[in-house]
Image (tube, coloured by chain):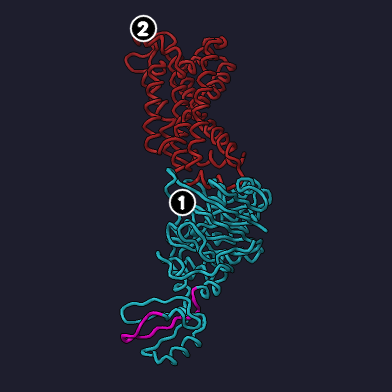
Chain colours: A red, B cyan
Amino acid sequence: MTRYIVLEIRRTLRDGSFLIFGTGMPVMMYLLFTNIGGGGGVDGWKTASMVGIAAYGALSSAMSIGTGVASDKQLGWLEQLRVTPLAPSRAVVGRAISGSVTVLPTILTVLLAGGLVNGVRLDVWQWITLVLLLWIGALPFTLLGLGNGYRLTPQSTGVVNVACLMGFAIVGGLWFPLELLPGWLRSIGRFTPANRFADLGWATTEGHAPGTGTIAVLCGWLLLFGAYAVISYRRSARTV
Amino acid sequence: MVLTGAVKTFGRAGGVVRAVDGIDLSIGRGETVALLGRNGAGKSTTIRLLLGLDRPDSGTVRVLGRTAERAVLDGLVGAMLQDGRPIQRVTVRELIAFVASTYPRPMPVAEALALAGVSAYANRRIDKLSGGQTQRVRFAVALAGNPELIVLDEPTAALDVEARRTFWESMRAYARRGNTVLFSTHYLEEADENADRIVVVDRGRIVADGSGDAIRGSAGSSLVSFDLAGGPAEGLELLPGVIAVEVSGDRALLRTDDSDATVRELARLDAIRGLQVSRATLEDAFLALTAPAAAVPVPASETETVR
């Protein structure tokens, strides 16, 4: 399985446009959001936005695995894998792991921009925890992307992924603080996966552990998206 | 015994199409077998059953004494599927090394590359190769794990003559190592030249099974044709050696397995006008065996497979 993970990581990292847009876009958004209109007026916005946008970037690259899987399906690669001794369950797990590794560059570049350009100051343990939590916390979205990829064509996976991404990012308060949203949406927002995901990071920058509520909600989403990925895979295995 | 397929029936969604309608086939270790049939005859479905990609509705599939899925997981099978396209951003060597690593006893990567004839472009990316080169890479994928059985679904489709020739050279080199090869094709010459045994599939059933010569013989080894000149066509099937009779216009075509006896009797009847005797080709036999209304009753000994 390790060889499979390495192969898939290689394929992703060689995709220049994926790397440039996948990591470049969030960094650009972050610098824009924090420096435009006399940015930094609100105390701690540079830090909060850094976490929000890093979460958004992680979410975006995690879900993009779906497009890869959908096109692998179309190329017949998934079927070719099924006639090698690599067990189907290992193929799925391996793909999820390789997908989550490619989330790292995005998180790292946004955090670097925060530290070097915007002068965000955190303790060393906070930086490390931040990277780890954002990395691990992206798993539900990797599974959501996988589910979409196994179920849909490459084109529709792309569209569905973008729709999910925008919805999650806005309702979850990754781009703008949740406080700017209407009250009813704000209360829903606190239960969306992206908001709780970013909350892992916000708790870290504020120097305390994330609440049990946050972890419980995230685990719920993890189970839901995991089930979705498994069901989609089973369905596709019949036709792929 | 490498592969024992019992009866396999398979119904597509809705149960309307029976792609494989009771195929009974067993293949011995070390054999090179061609699955010959028209497009849509059921070749690919048969292969998908053998690889465990589909399950039969009834009947069983056994490969090397276990289920097809198990045989694949145990690394005993390598396959080249019909419509696999190159994946992006991976070199030939990387792909072959990865596939080999999934098998318990792979052959050295360099050897697999050489055997499939892809060493020259091993470091190039697969998505940058030509169609013929891609096809050979897919062959390398099938043999990288050094499996006992390789299954090739229409391996030479879309290849030009030269690429086809070099492909079969590679395939025969692999078969000479004592491996079992099953390939499907709709090219008669390919089946005849590269397989020890040809299994003719038509509308989901096996209609003939044997060497190229045996299949030629099953539909009559010779063709005798002559002008009827207004004479009766009835009773011609009773002439010695005659297996089947076709009449088109004023000309009769007899399939016979003893042309001498047939001609002698025709001479006795004074029926020889514009006589022609020719050796039946595999194509004649194939057409006779798979014609929509098969005129030739196939001898039972040819349809039944040795178990």
Q: Quadrant of residue A39?
A: top left
Q: Nearer the viewer, residue B101 or B205?
A: B205
Which residues lie in the magenta part? Answer: B219-234
Give percent across and percent down for residue A31: 39, 22
Which mark lies nearer to you, 2 or 1?
1
Q: Is residue B198 among the parts visible in the rendering?
A: yes
Q: Main secondary structure of the magenta part?
A: loop
Give percent across and percent down for residue B282: 48, 73
Q: Secondary structure at mark 1?
A: strand
Q: Amino acid at mark 1?
A: Arg
Question: Which residue is denoted by mark 1 in the rendering?
Answer: B18
Q: Amino acid at mark 2?
A: Gly
Q: Residues within 10 Å of mark 2 (few under 14, many from 20)?
A: few
Q: Which mark is residue B126?
A: none
- To the question of a shared chain for discs 2 and 1, the answer is no
Q: Quadrant of residue B31?
A: bottom right
Q: Is residue B53 among the parts visible in the rendering?
A: no
Question: Which residue is denoted by mark 2 in the rendering?
Answer: A183
Give percent across and percent down for residue A125: 59, 16
Q: Chain of mark 2?
A: A
Task: Find the distance from the CA under tag 2 to the CA under tag 1.
Answer: 60 Å
Q: Is residue B233 magenta?
A: yes
Give percent across and percent down for residue B47: 53, 54
Tell me the residue at 54%/56% (across/down): B23
Q: Secondary structure at mark 2?
A: helix
Tag 2 and tag 1, C-beta contact below 8 Å: no
Q: Is residue B128 magenta?
A: no
Q: Quarter of the image containing the N terminus of chain B?
A: bottom right
Q: How many marks?
A: 2
Tell me the residue at 55%/24% (across/down): A136
| Rendered view: A19 above or below B89 | above
